[in-house]
Amino acid sequence: MKCEELLALLNEYVDGTVDPSVCVEFEKHMAGCNPCQIVVDNIRQTITLFKDGQPYAMPVQFREKMHDTLRKKWNEKFSAK
Amino acid sequence: MTNQFTPETPDAELVRLAKAGELDAFEGLTNRYEQRVYGLAMRMLRQEQDAEDVTQQTFLSVLENLEGFRGEASFSTWVLRIASHAALKIIRKRKGLNTVSLEEATEPSDDLNSVPHPEFIADWRQSPEHLVERNEVRRLLDDALTRLDEKHRLVFLLRDVEGLSVRETADALELSEGNVKVRLLRARLQLREDLTRVLGDPARQFVRSHHHHE
C-alpha cells in the first residue's frame, strides 16, 4: 500500500468500516510510515475534539419564546380542523 | 387523553401521538432536538440571531409538515435535514445567492483523486481530553470550521458531531453516499491540517522528504 492509497481509505479505517484484509495492509503501511501514522492519529484527535467540544447552549429566553410561538401555531392548526 | 412518555419513549411513538394532535408529544420532540438543532446552526452560522431563526424555522416546519413525514428516514435525520437547509439558505443569502440546492454541487473537487495531501504533520502537544477543557479551543475549532466550504462543513457536522451514519448524512443532504464520503474526507483532512498548525508540536514536526514512499 502507498501513502495515497492509505489516504483514500482513511475514512473507512478511522470509522472502523474497512475490509479486514485491507485493514491489515493499512496497518502494515502505518507501522513503516511514521507520517501516515501521525496523520491517522491527528484525524482521530480532530474528530474527538469536535465531538466532545463544548456545546452551544440555547438562550433560555429564546427557548421560551419559541415554545410560545410553536404552541400558538399548534393551536391554530388543530383548532382549524 | 393524557399520554405519559419517558426519555425512553421512541421518537416514532411521539411522532404518532403528535400527528394525532397531542401537543405534549410535539413538545417532547422539540425538547429532544432543539439543542442539537441550535448547536448545528451556531456552528454553521456563528451568529446567535441566525441560529435562533434556524431553530425556530426548523420546528415550525416540523409542525407544518409532520403529517407528510412517513418515517422513511428517522425523525432525527429528518429534523437535521430541515435545519441544514435552513442554515444553508442563510449562508447563500449572505453571499447574495438564491439557490439552496445541495446536489448541484457535484464538482470536480468532489473527486477522491483531488483530495489534498497532508502537509503539516506533527504530533499534538496535548491530548484532545486536555484541549476540550480550554476555552480558547472552541474559538480555534470554530475558526477552522468557518474556513471550510459550507458543503464540507455541513457533512462534517452531521457525520462527526451529530453522529449520523454516512447513509443518513446522504439522506439528510440529498447527496450520494460517495459524495458524502469524499466531502467528509476533505473536511477531516482540512480540519486536521488547520488544527495541527496550531496544536502540533513544531519540535516534532515531520518533514516529508518524498511524497510517495511505499
Image: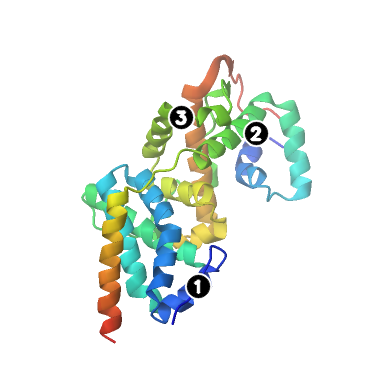
Pointer 1 residue: B4
Give the chain letter at badge 2: A
Does residue B141 appear to the left or right of A29 in the view shown?
Answer: left
Mark 3 crowd level (few <14, some 14–19, many ≥20, 10 Å Cα): many
Coordinates of residue B26 in the picture (x, y in percent): 40, 70
Pointer 3 residue: B194
Q: Amino acid at mark 1?
A: Gln
Q: Label 1, label 2: how many angstroms apart (C-alpha)?
A: 56 Å
Q: Which mark is residue A3?
A: 2
Helix, strand or loop status at disc 2: helix
Coordinates of residue B87 in the picture (x, y in percent): 33, 53
Q: Label 3, label 1: how many angstroms apart (C-alpha)?
A: 48 Å
Front residue (pair B169, B175): B169
Q: Residue at x 72, y 39 (%)?
A: A26
Q: Amino acid at mark 3?
A: Asp
Task: Give the label, 1 or 2, closer to the camera.
Answer: 1
Asked if both marks, 3 and 1, belong to the same chain, the answer given is: yes
Task: Give the label, 3 or 1, closer to the camera.
Answer: 1
Which quarter of the picture shows residue B24?
bottom left
Q: Amino acid at mark 2?
A: Cys
Q: Is residue B5 visible?
A: yes
Q: From what the image shows, is residue B114 above or below residue B72?
A: above
Asked if both marks, 2 and 3, belong to the same chain, the answer given is: no
Q: Label 2, label 3: how many angstroms apart (C-alpha)?
A: 20 Å
Q: Which mark is residue B52?
A: none
